[in-house]
Amino acid sequence: MAKIFCVANQKGGVGKTTTAVNLAAGLAQLNQRVLLADLDPQGNATMGAGINKADLKATIYQVLLGMSDIKGVRVTSETGKFDVLPANRELAGAEVEMVELENREKRLKDAFALVADEYDFILIDCPPALSLLTLNGLCAANGVIIPMQCEYYALEGLSDLVNTIKKVHANLNPDLKIIGLLRVMFDPRMTLSQQVSSELESHFGDKVFKTVIPRNVRLAEAPSYGLPGVVFDPASKGAQAYIEFGAEMVERIKTM
């Protein structure tokens, strides 16, 4: 049975999609069966996995609205060696259309039930907003991975996200918990980065992943080639950090 994890943070530009795509590829390299669900209408995770969102006949939009099941929509990332539940701009309309639907917060959870036995991990790349799409991700997940830059504004947004996770846990998904905080785009030369990192460790303890993802140009370049960073330049520090993070995730779920 798959472990389902949301990669979520309502702050934009913090490396959610980079984390989701590279964790999926890193886990695939560790011989795990992975499905990456793209819940962001921008479709960046889809493109980052090497899939052209303009050519898609069906997306996660059809799954959420009950027009298709996951088996009829998923595609394989040839570059990353994992399956993708893709998205494009069509998904932006799902927010409005789902409002009238029964059980609207749990559409994705119900869809995953059909394929959960086929995967070891299902990763959900959430949009940078606490929307109905993000809520579907949180209701479907066993836990949340929170990518964070070590800067002041990141701490401000973190408390809002933690409160939202607590509310979803209390009212909609009692299985939901924070799996861990992942420090991304980390620059050890900056005093502020080190201060915020220390603050996270003292406040959240072992909820902070040991792996730290450094700021890395090769990771930023990879999506323009339709490749996960761990495939684009496996020797880069960023790629090696995500492989290390994949191994840490495998170990962490053994203790869950």
Image: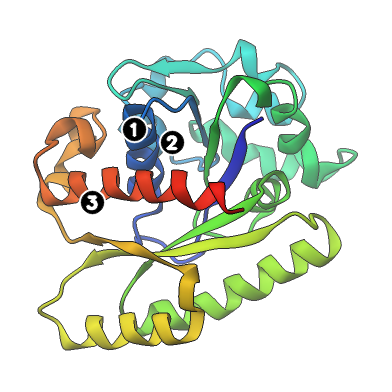
10 Å crowding of disc 3: few (<14), some (14-19), many (20+): many
Q: Position of residue 251 (x, y in %)?
A: 45, 48
Task: Determine whether the residue tagged by mark 3 lies in a helix, strand or loop.
Answer: helix
* The N terminus lies in quadrant: top right
The earlier-in-sequence mark between 2 and 1 is 1
Q: Nearer the viewer, residue 85 or 187?
A: 187
Q: Amino acid at mark 1?
A: Ala
Task: Determine whether the residue tagged by mark 1 lies in a helix, strand or loop.
Answer: helix
Q: For mark 2, what is the residue?
A: 43
Q: Is residue 110 above or below residue 134?
A: above
Q: For mark 3, what is the residue?
A: 241
Q: Amino acid at mark 2?
A: Gly
Residue 126: tell me if it is visible. no
Task: Determine whether the residue tagged by mark 2 lies in a helix, strand or loop.
Answer: loop
Q: For mark 1, what is the residue?
A: 25
Could you give the CA–CA distance between mark 3 and mark 2, rounded to whole angstroms?
A: 24 Å
Q: Amino acid at mark 3?
A: Ala
Quarter holding residue 52? top left
Q: Is residue 71 above or below residue 230?
A: above
Residue 169 horizontal side relative to residue 186, left or right: right
**Residue at the image position 65 percent from the left and 56 percent from the top:** 131
**Residue at the image position 70 percent from the left and 43 percent from the top:** 140
10 Å crowding of disc 2: few (<14), some (14-19), many (20+): many
The earlier-in-sequence mark between 3 and 1 is 1
Could you give the CA–CA distance between mark 2 and mark 1, rounded to whole angstroms?
A: 17 Å
Q: Nearer the viewer, residue 55 or 196?
A: 196
Residue 98 horizontal side relative to residue 190, left or right: right
Outermost residue toward the front? 255
Q: Position of residue 31 (x, y in %)?
A: 39, 25
